[in-house]
Amino acid sequence: MAVIKGRDISFSYGSGKKTLDHASIRAEAGELIALLGCNGCGKSTLVRHLNALLPLQKGELRVAGLDARAQANCWRLRRQCGMVFQNPDNQFVSSVVEEDIAFGLENYETPEEEIPTRVRAALAAVGMSGFEKRAPHLLSGGQKQRVALAGVLALNPDIIVFDEVTAMLDPQGRREVLGIIDRLRAGGKKTLVMITHYVEEAVMADRVYLMAGGNVTAQGSPRDILTDAALLAQNGLLAPLPVRMYEDLKAAGVPLERCPLTNEELVEELCRFA
Amino acid sequence: MPFCLEEVSFTYAAGTPLAVQALRGVSLRMEAGEVLGVMGHTGCGKSTLIQLLAGLLVPTHGRVLLDGQDINAPGCDRAALRARVGLVFQYPECQLFEITVAKDVTFGLKHSGLSPAQKEERVRAALETVGFSYERMGAQSPLALSGGEKRRVAIAGVLAARPEILIFDEPIAGLDPMGRERFLALVRRLNAQGTSIVLVSHNADALAQCADRLLVLKDGCVALEGTAEQVFADVEAARRLQVDVSTPRALGQMLTQRGVAVPAGAVTYEGLLSVLKERFCAGGNP
Ligand SMILES: Nc1ncnc2c1ncn2[C@@H]1O[C@H](COP(=O)(O)OP(=O)(O)OP(=O)(O)O)[C@@H](O)[C@H]1O
Ligand SMILES: Nc1ncnc2c1ncn2[C@@H]1O[C@H](COP(=O)(O)OP(=O)(O)O)[C@@H](O)[C@H]1O
Ligand SMILES: [Mg+2]
Ligand SMILES: [Mg+2]
């Protein structure tokens, strides 16, 4: 069942320029999709439609069964589709972790007696139990992003959008956050959308979408899309390092056979050949 | 030009119960024309270090010397320091506040004494350097830009002043892959023109490509220092300091463990490619 079904979405911030131009996107229940594209191609603009941060101007969009055109659905969409952003430092309203998560729940009129349980469950889900009383600004980058995600999870959304959530993180923070995303995916209960400029991260997705100039230009399995260096170049993107290495070695006359998608696969292929 | 930290310590909220010691006795000497990469886990003190270099924070202990002068000494010319040292912040949105991109990029030229025409020329050149056209981008509101576009405008704003020392805090975060390559090419070009550059980044691949020397901080101290080849030689040691080695170096180690020996010095894409070509191309195959 499609949880996100968007067709021919066009959008302009004003000024006449079309930021989205007939963009179509679809995600099935429980899948993780990755959205790749250059700076300014419209990724964030597209996902801001999913939770009605931006109004649908043209096209069709249904999210979790709700029609995004209906103004009346705005509030429910915002709750059904949570978002985590790039900057770990400006996503908090309170100086205590548990209060920050409770704040979102109160906003959505959660019965008061439920709040403590849900705060604890959300922190447990991101591996941050025990951090209830801590100050968000004193946590590491990865921990901040996990708390921000807990704030979203507490509302029990069907869909979670990650807009470049690892961009500012150190290697450990990145692994922590990617690990949580992978765990959520394995749980199969949430539909996940991930925007990233690191093609290696898109490898973990079930499906990859490419965007360019306000359009969704291609979609397919990570292997089909990410090993197609020409397609990526057409969209202003760079293939993952193992793919480039494979292409360059082949061009130099090394008769490799299978195009690798990951570092491990590249090593396999080279060792097989050695 | 030598830029030095002498036994610098820094404590936020010193003397209060909330005091946090961010740097502990850090010494550092940077030569003219050098590209210095700084790595380390979150909270290790990278942003603190470069704010001290830029004169935005004053050491709790120790001194920051530029050309042998203590930049925090009472007589030191702050305006001159700001003109010589440009800093691009970690979060570009913190740096953009004017109503148009052109005004924003011009802001740093306020006290430059340049004529309006000269300023416009500078702004035009700076925007072009980051891949934007003055005509198309100049009149836009900075708030109406995508994340990566904001970062590029913030970089242009600092370039316009043509400082002799440029400091970037996580400049690559949020840039698309081509933008990343363009930025690294820009670093090399500016460096070739004589600019000294400090690059704070978690991106080991990028640092391996363009830093002459790397500094790894851990818990407010310098834990490791050397060329990328030296710092990434011991993959386990780097991991213990919570930094990644570059992807080519990690691949080299994986291959070596599987019996395809790759020297530890192959830390860049080109380096690894040429080793593999040598080994696998006709004639080189054992
Ligand atoms: N609030 C806004 N008002 C006007 N124009 C905007 C606004 N936000 C974004 N834009 C423009 O719309 C285009 C798409 O922006 P968007 O933020 O969707 O890009 P993106 O694909 O997320 O890019 P990035 O990778 O840099 O985050 C850009 O050209 C940007 O300048
Ligand atoms: N404005 C501030 N007030 C109090 N503590 C701070 C402030 N800025 C940073 N710190 C603390 O100082 C230490 C170093 O921080 P920072 O220099 O930002 O590290 P990095 O840039 O390497 O992530 C961390 O423990 C951090 O929490
Ligand atoms: Mg974006
Ligand atoms: Mg920092």
Image (cartoon, coloured by chain):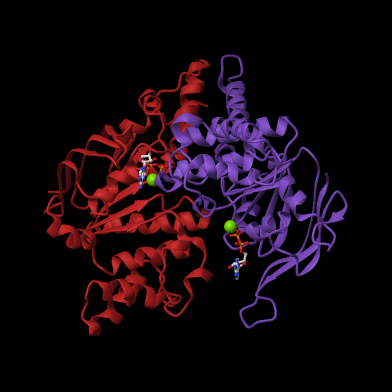
Chain colours: A red, B purple
Residue B204 visible? The answer is no
Query: Quick check: A53 left or right of B195?
Result: left
Residue B37, x across and y down, in percent: 67, 46
Query: Quick check: A2 left or right of A249?
Result: left
Question: In the rendered image of this protein, does residue B236 appear above or below residue B155?
Answer: below
Residue at image position (62%, 43%) is B158
Residue A105 quadrant? bottom left
Question: In the rendered image of this protein, does residue B94 appear above or below residue A196?
Answer: below
Query: A256 or A81, which lies in front?
Result: A81
Residue A67, x across and y down, in percent: 12, 51
Residue A216, x across and y down, in percent: 27, 34
Query: A248 or B170, which lies in front?
Result: B170
Residue B198, x across and y down, in percent: 68, 46
Residue B203 quadrant? top right
Q: Quadrant of ligand 2?
A: bottom right
Residue at image position (63%, 30%) is B271
